[in-house]
Image: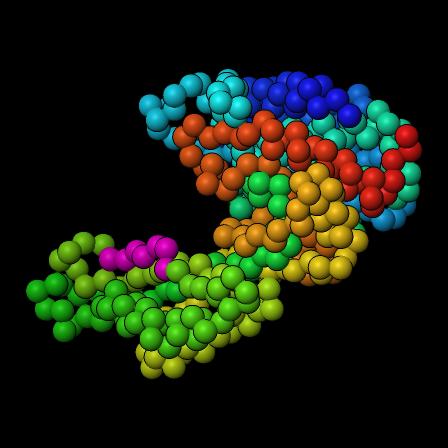
Amino acid sequence: MNETAIRDRLTEILRDLIAIPSPFPPGDSVAISAYAAGRLRAAGYRTEVLAEAPGVDNVVGRLGEGGPQLVFNAHSDTVAVGDRSLWSSDPYQAEMRDGRIHGLGAGNCKGSMAVQLWLAEEIARRGGPARGTLAFTFVADEENLGPHGMAFLRRAGHVRPDILILGAQTENQMIVAERGVLWARVTTSGRAAHAGNPAAGDNAILRLVRLLGTLETQLKPRLDARRDGDMQSTINVGLIDGGANANVVPARAGMTIDRRLLPGEKVEDALAELHAILEAAGEPAGSWALERLTGTNGFRAGADGPGVTALAAAIAARSGHPARLLNATGVSDGRYFADDGIEIVNFGPGSGAEGHAANESVPLSQMVESAIILLNCVHNLLGIRD
């Protein structure tokens, strides 16, 4: 295998991807999806561009027939540029420095997208999978944690994987377990009054503070004791709002909670636990409400499943060392398939510390390594007709 040729093709693809703006906001993925779809069609894939929201295009390309269904995924959207003065080069022009390709989305997640496009073309060039179906999905709405990307493809039945490999910044190691996430909103109500006579009112902010204190003293110790290896069950209050003016007793207040769940915990149970603890605080009935905003369960792929086994073998063959399992801080689009009983693995070039930062970059050597590993993984799972 000519690694110089692989390096050159990966560089070309990533340069093209970085030059196509796809930041959220606004989340427009029309141009970058057209680029990916064009390459897949030219390689011989049955390709669709699918959307349920204007401007939020997603690409699905398939080669082969029947099972097993091996699906690759990378998200095509990025965060916004942010403070342009912090960038040492044009965020939309790939720049090679010290063996790394710099540009917006280079690591998260256009580096993996470039690798997967190379992989799709290389497998097609060699004749396609010997058995089963190979699919590539390039989706938007990931940076928005929104419903119109991979969540839409699953909900509408456009992809039904047996094994799902998602592009991620894992430095070519594996993430096979991921925590679930629950976002919830607690709203308190009271009675407005003049601040000169606060006793005439009922302060909704103070009620919120009391409820927050109950979560701190009653729930947090429970969560501190819940661990699964390196994973921790957590709660974070990320937003607090309330009141109209300093001279008015506030009639409403609210807080938004981020609750991270171990793979063995369920969103509905976590919501019920929150409700029970808040109810035990003793605030009057009807003076507060708990609302689920969004939530998905966590997942864990079995260590002996065919996908994990094949990818681990490919990593070991390339590196000479056993594959390492990493701990995920955030969440991936794999969470939408958490309850489907499939194997879900995150894998790709780059470090998570590079994502969402000015001067984002990805090592070209890791992209080459990632491409070779994934090619061998597909060979291990489906075979390749060459």
Residue farthest toward the front in the current orientation of the protein: 320
Q: Is residue 113 above or below residue 240?
A: above
- The region drawn magenta spans 237-243
Give the residue drawn at x 54%, y 52%.
328
Q: Quadrant of the C terminus?
A: top right
Near-viewer residue (66 or 278): 66
Nearest the viewer among 162 and 241 is: 162
Q: Quadrant of residue 251?
A: bottom left
Residue 272 x/y as whole percent: 51, 74
Query: Is 240 in the magenta?
Result: yes
Let me know if residue 358 is in the magenta part.
Answer: no
- Spot occupied by residue 255 in the image (x, y as percentages of width and height): 36, 60
Residue 53: image location, x then y, percent? 61, 37
Residue at (53% x, 24% y) in the render: 99
Q: Nearer the viewer, residue 95 or 194?
A: 95
Q: Residue at x 37, y 64 (%)?
A: 187
Assign the magenta stretch its main secondary structure: strand
- Residue 132: name its quadrant: top right
Report the residue at 48% width, 64% height from top.
Answer: 232
Q: Position of residue 246 (x, y in %)?
A: 15, 56
Which picture quadrant has residue 75?
top right
Quick check: can you spot residue 281? yes
Q: Residue furthest left?
A: 196
Task: Specify whether 50 is left or right of 192.
Answer: right
318 relative position to 215: left or right = right
